Amino acid sequence: MTLRSLVLAALITIGVSESAAAQTQAQVQTASAATIDWVARACTPETAFGLRFGERADDPGHRVFDDALQPFTGLSFRSTERSRRVFLVETTGMFRLAPGSTQSDPVAGRQLFEAVDARIRELGTFSSRESVIDEDGDIDITYSRPTARPESRVVLEVAFMFGGVWMTCRDLELVDLQFREVFQ
């Protein structure tokens, strides 16, 4: 092969790689509107992602979702020490960077985070919203004072970190009960 052939082959390879990268970036993974709506509505003064606050939880603290809620694959929950009452439920939504990858896609994750936040605000289910951005670029939004029951101490935290969306719904009255059961 001549030098000219090698340079031409290299340019073609670079062009194909750049084209594939551009196609990949153009096809950002997204969650369905139904999934975004479901997670945006899933924290209420009574329930968190399908579980009722205060219900007895004798089984392990994990549930798996069906594929309809992708990229949210399941939830975990915590219950009080002695009375076993559910007080905190969380879920995480992440898109893989590539098939088989263990890394998350930060572009798709950020778009999902923004869509969930926008839907929660559009629904108007909480009257208070506080946002914090840390030095690493992670974002944490805390929603409180549910409009359906402003006296409720239910809090929803939605965070963008590690390229995914982390959601935690907790009832602070039951968190207080957990504290009492552990330390008194």
Image (tube, rainbow, N blue to C red):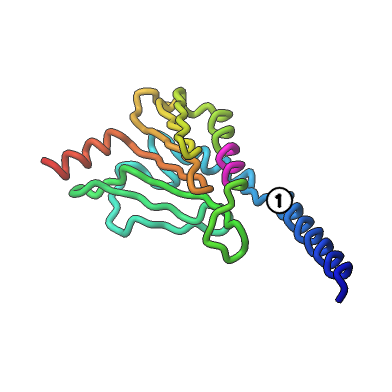
Total numbered labels: 1
Q: Is residue 86 magenta?
A: no
Residue at x-position 57% and y-position 40%: 37
From the viewer's perspective, is residue 149 above or below residue 89?
above
Q: Quadrant of the N terminus?
A: bottom right
Three-letter residue code for mark 1: Gln
Where in the figure is residue 101, as x and y percent of width and height?
A: 56, 63
Nearer to the camera, 138 or 49: 138
Residue underneath mark 1: 25
Q: Is residue 112 magenta?
A: yes
Residue at x-position 13% and y-position 42%: 183
> Residue 180 vs residue 96: left or right?
left
Label 1 SS? helix
Secondary structure mostly seen in the magenta stretch? helix
Give the magenta-colored segment's residue range.
Answer: 109-115
Where in the figure is residue 83, as x and y percent of width and height?
A: 20, 47
Nearer to the camera, 97 or 115: 97
Nearer to the camera, 27 or 22: 22
Kindly give the residue lying farthest to the left in the view shown.
Answer: 184
Which quarter of the picture shows residue 61?
bottom left
From the viewer's perspective, is residue 132 above or below residue 57?
above
How many C-alpha atoms fall within 10 Å of the one at disc 1: few (<14), some, or many (≥20)? few
Kindly give the residue lying farthest to the bottom in the view shown.
Answer: 1
